[in-house]
Image (cartoon, helix red, strand yellow):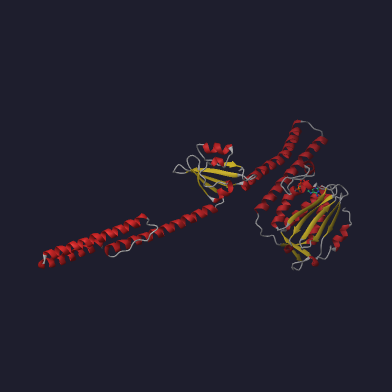
Amino acid sequence: MVWFNNLVALLVVLGIAGIIAFFSPIAAALVLALALAWFVIAQSRNTQKLYDWLLAPQLRSVPESSGSWGEIFDNVSRFMRSEQHARDALTEEIEQIRESIDRLPDALIVLDDKNVIQWCNAAAENLLGVFASRRPITQFIRQPEFGRYLKADSYDAPLELELSTRPGRIFEVRIHDTEDRKRLLISRDITEQAMLNQMRSDFVANVSHEIRTPVTVIGGFAETMLDLDLDEAKRREYLGTIVRNSHTMQRLVEDLLTLSSLEAMDTTGLNETIDLARLFTTLAGEARDLSNGRHEIRSEPPRGLSILGRTAEIESAIRNFLTNAVRYTPENGTISLEWKRSTDNDGWISVRDNGIGIAAEHLPRLSERFYRVDRGRSRATGGTGLGLAIVKRIANRHNASLHIDSVIGEGSTFSLILPKSRIKTTDGAIADAATDTGAADDDLANKADKSP
Ligand code: ADP
């Protein structure tokens, strides 16, 4: 303790001076004067050291001394060290927070009450070329609607914008008032979400449109039948139209349900063993029934091969190709169901027809929901515009793909390409192209057969 040490020193000096005063009061006074002089000089030196150090405490080390001043300087030094540690820890923490904010995909910008940029993160720099530049934000986001948004009284709803620095992308801009009269501007890329919303509303509009047509026809014909006294022939004709349109609606609802269940279903149960020969025979038989003798339907299944997949889904995909081939191939045309292996061992199940064909510009869009080359023809043949969208979904679920080749006026080939891991010999081994043994005998017989 500093005061105690100084008190002891004073008592010692006074004691010595008291003893000397017995012999010589003058000598005692001299000792006291010397002690006082020494004390004043020591205090002045240490005060000067402290003063000099305080002029630049960060640059110089804390001075050293002995006695009470030594203790004081040691304490100051300890205090400075612990302050430095606290400062380092705080700096590190701020650095980490800054790094995290810089890693955010959203652009953050702090504005003052005059909308001048105070601070921003890395995403804002990349997105807008905004640097913590002390320039008004309106110099970087120049759209008039943003100017109006800035002036608004409340920022409950965000603003959607296309920024000039990122053409084709859509951004959501939000402003939050902070307590110190500043504003935090957050901007986020919502292109995917906006596209999804657009797709959703297009889908609802399409479904409504598709349903409205047959419903209007059914309603119209039913009303006419109620209002008019029709002869038997007309009555049957109108009832036929009503039934046809109700079937269209039924198919539409069924296809919509299939699509939504495919989207909701997980990918378990996709490894059933499906014998290719049996699959080809069944589906070619169905196609012959559908064609009702109007086409030659060939089927060329390989022997001894199976594929792994969900039977109902694979059947539905190939059935879709065949149904379309029957619908879009004029009478006396030829439709064949084929199997081949590509050079990288994938398995192609293809339906080839020599029907009307499709112009090249339509090919990339055929698997979009409700996309049709010729809406009238699709409707007239009972199409829903969802068949290839369903096939595409089934293909994705099986790590397979949909391939379409077509030449307008010459015909089309629709293929489901299965990865080699989904192709097995009937005894369960993974089959490579060398294992394929050509078309099964019974189906070869069908090859040249015109269906009954
Ligand atoms: P849709 O129910 O209209 O047939 P799909 O999704 O099955 O719907 O097919 C989309 C469109 O692709 C059809 O409207 C048709 O224009 C075209 N298309 C499909 N298969 C064939 C084919 N074999 N030949 C010619 N055009 C086809």
Quarter residue 417 falls in: bottom right
Residue occupying the point 65% across, 56% down: 266
Residue nearer the viewer, 354 or 55: 55
In-image side of 269 versus 277 (left or right): left
In-image side of 313 versus 10 (left or right): right
Q: Position of residue 213 (x, y in %)?
A: 73, 38
Question: Relative to residue 87, is residue 428 depicted above or below?
Answer: below
**Residue, far left:** 22
Quarter residue 272 falls in: bottom right
Residue nearer the viewer, 194 or 31: 31
Total count of labels: 0
Quarter residue 243 falls in: top right
Where is the N terminus found, in terms of image quarters?
bottom left
Residue nearer the viewer, 89 or 452: 89
Residue occupying the point 29% across, 60% down: 46
Q: Position of residue 5 (x, y in %)?
A: 23, 64
Q: Position of residue 148 (x, y in %)?
A: 55, 36
Question: Relative to residue 378, is residue 305 depicted above or below?
Answer: below
Q: Position of residue 328 (x, y in %)?
A: 82, 47
In-image side of 401 versus 21 (left or right): right
Question: Relative to residue 221, is residue 61 depicted above or below?
Answer: below
